[in-house]
């Protein structure tokens, strides 16, 4: 049980290339990043199904990167690192990492660890992770019970995501739902609406925000979403 897509963040080129080839041979689509900032600057940094992260990185530290990931996604995070400090494991777990492997480690062992974490993530009861769109009171309710007030514009967006069932909704479809034409100004307005909604969700709950952008295509709500 391996993930479909995986982000590998490691600045050791030889190791990264070898692990990428090994996982690719197993059917995983791997995108390698030599630094955390390269991941965060890519088109969709929070859209991967799994993350393998080193701790010793040139810019943003691996621990801090995991904390950022946990703000936006609940998928598996495996740390593979040569850092030997006594409190490393504690730091990884507190940041939100699922498992820690110490280098040197064989590629086969990394693949087995990824499979174990992915199995746990996939076995999580989806009902416990369900977001609810309460149409009656115009609110989005997070899995932990936190509530986010929605404007009429937000409600129309969320209705699109309910209908899409986790798939990407094209920008044109969202603009049409909002009664706007797909020109540059209304596209910027859409970006602003999604950004403000995401920020309100972040302030309301520590849960990962599943509202994600697909560069050049549209937006998706990557979590179970039920309208009531």
Image: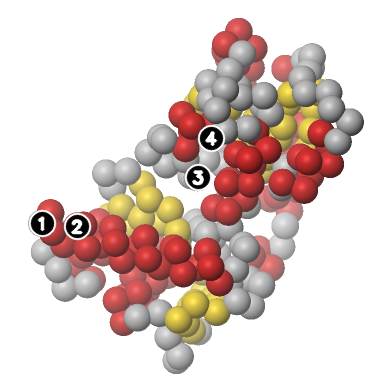
Q: Secondary structure at mark 2?
A: helix
Q: Is residue 176 left or right of residue 122?
A: left
Residue 183: which numbered mark, if any?
Answer: 1
Give me the C-alpha separation between circle 4 and circle 3: 11 Å
Q: Which mark sits nearer the N-terminus, 3 or 2?
A: 3
Decide if residue 40 is on the left or right side of residue 218. Answer: right
Q: Residues within 10 Å of mark 2 (few under 14, many from 20)?
A: some
Q: Is residue 184 above or below residue 103?
A: below
According to the image, label 2 marks what residue?
187
Q: Position of residue 90 (x, y in %)?
A: 84, 41
Q: Residue furthest bottom?
A: 136
Q: Position of residue 7 (x, y in %)?
A: 55, 32
User: Which label sits in the foreground, 4 or 1?
Assistant: 1
SS under mark 4: strand
Q: Horizontal and vertical percent for residue 216?
A: 27, 44
Q: Residue at x 33, y 57 (%)?
A: 169
Is mark 4 in CB contact (under 8 Å) with mark 1? Answer: no
Exactly how many numbered labels are in the figure? 4
- The residue under label 3 is 46
Which residue in the protein does label 4 denote? 5
């Amino acid at each position: 049980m391996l993930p479909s897509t995986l982000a590998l963040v490691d600045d050791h080129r030889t190791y990264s290339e070898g692990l990428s080839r090994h996982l690719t041979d197993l059917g995983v689509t791997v995108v390698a990043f030599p630094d955390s900032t390269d991941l965060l600057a890519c088109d969709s940094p929070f859209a991967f199904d799994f993350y393998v992260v080193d701790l010793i990185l040139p810019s943003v530290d691996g621990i801090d990167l995991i904390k950022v990931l946990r703000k936006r996604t609940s998928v598996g995070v495996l740390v593979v690192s040569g850092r030997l400090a006594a409190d490393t494991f504690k730091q990884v777990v507190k940041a939100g990492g699922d498992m820690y492997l110490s280098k040197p480690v064989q590629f086969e062992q990394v693949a087995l660890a990824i499979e174990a974490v992915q199995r746990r993530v996939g076995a999580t009861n989806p009902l416990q992770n369900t977001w609810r769109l309460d149409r009656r009171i115009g609110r989005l309710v997070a899995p932990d019970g936190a509530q986010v007030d929605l404007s009429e514009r937000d409600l129309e967006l969320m209705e699109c995501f309910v209908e899409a069932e986790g798939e990407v909704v094209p920008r044109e479809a969202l603009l049409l739902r909002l009664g706007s034409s797909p020109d540059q100004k209304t596209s910027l307005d859409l970006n602003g609406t999604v950004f403000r909604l995401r920020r309100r969700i972040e302030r309301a709950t520590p849960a990962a925000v599943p509202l994600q952008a697909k560069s050049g295509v549209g937006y998706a709500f990557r979590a179970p979403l039920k309208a009531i």
